[in-house]
Image (cartoon, rainbow, N blue to C red):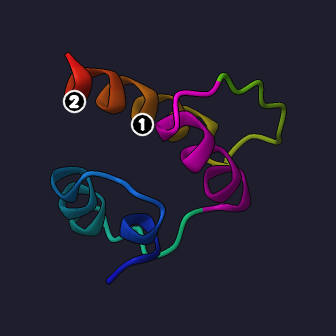
Amino acid sequence: MTAFSELGVMPEIVQAIEELDWILPTNVQAEAIPLILGGGDVLMAAETGSGKTAVSLFRISAWKEVA
């Protein structure tokens, strides 16, 4: 089990993440993903390379799952 799956990420997304060789979420991702998947709004400010863009995709995937 990966840390991403422990955060509640859909299995299809976890599989894609594993194929990219992402092992653990960044601190930004670990904080934001549960909030986003829970339907919350998140405002992030962090340095380049911290995983902010990837986090925004989790919101899109969560929305698609509900739709």
Q: Residue furthest top?
A: 67
Residue nearest the observer in this picture, 56 or 19: 56
Q: Nearer the N terminus, badge 2 or badge 1?
A: 1
Q: Look at the magenta stretch and give its main secondary structure.
A: helix
Circle 2 residue: 65
Residue numbers of the magenta segment? 26-40
Identify the secondary structure beneath mark 1: helix
Give how far apart the Cα atoms at labels 2 and 1 are: 11 Å
Looking at the picture, does residue 42 appear above or below residue 10? above
Q: Nearer the viewer, residue 27 or 19?
A: 27
Contact between labelled residues 1 and 2, with CB atoms less than 8 Å apart: no
- 58 left or right of 36 in image: left
Q: Looking at the figure, which quarter contains the N terminus?
A: bottom left
30 falls in the magenta region = yes
Residue drawn at x 64%, y 61% is 26
Report the amino acid beneath label 1: Phe
Q: Residue 18 location in percent, x, y?
A: 27, 69
Which quarter of the figure has residue 42?
A: top right
Image quadrant where residue 44 sits: top right
Q: Nearer the viewer, residue 19 or 32?
A: 32
Where is residue 63 drawn, in percent x and y?
33, 21
Residue at image point 19% right, 59% down: 11
Q: Is residue 35 above or below residue 9?
A: above
Based on the displayed image, in which of its 4 quarters is residue 57 positioned? top left
Q: Quadrant of the C terminus?
A: top left
Asked if residue 14 is among those painted magenta in the image, a careful observer would answer no
Q: Which residue is mark 1?
A: 58
Mark 2 packing: few (<14 Cα in 10 Å), some, or many (20+)? few
Within 10 Å of the Cα at label 1, are there few (<14), some (14-19), or many (20+) other Cα atoms? many
The residue drawn where x is 26% and y is 51% is 10
At 62% from the left edge and 40% from the top edge, which residue is drawn?
A: 35
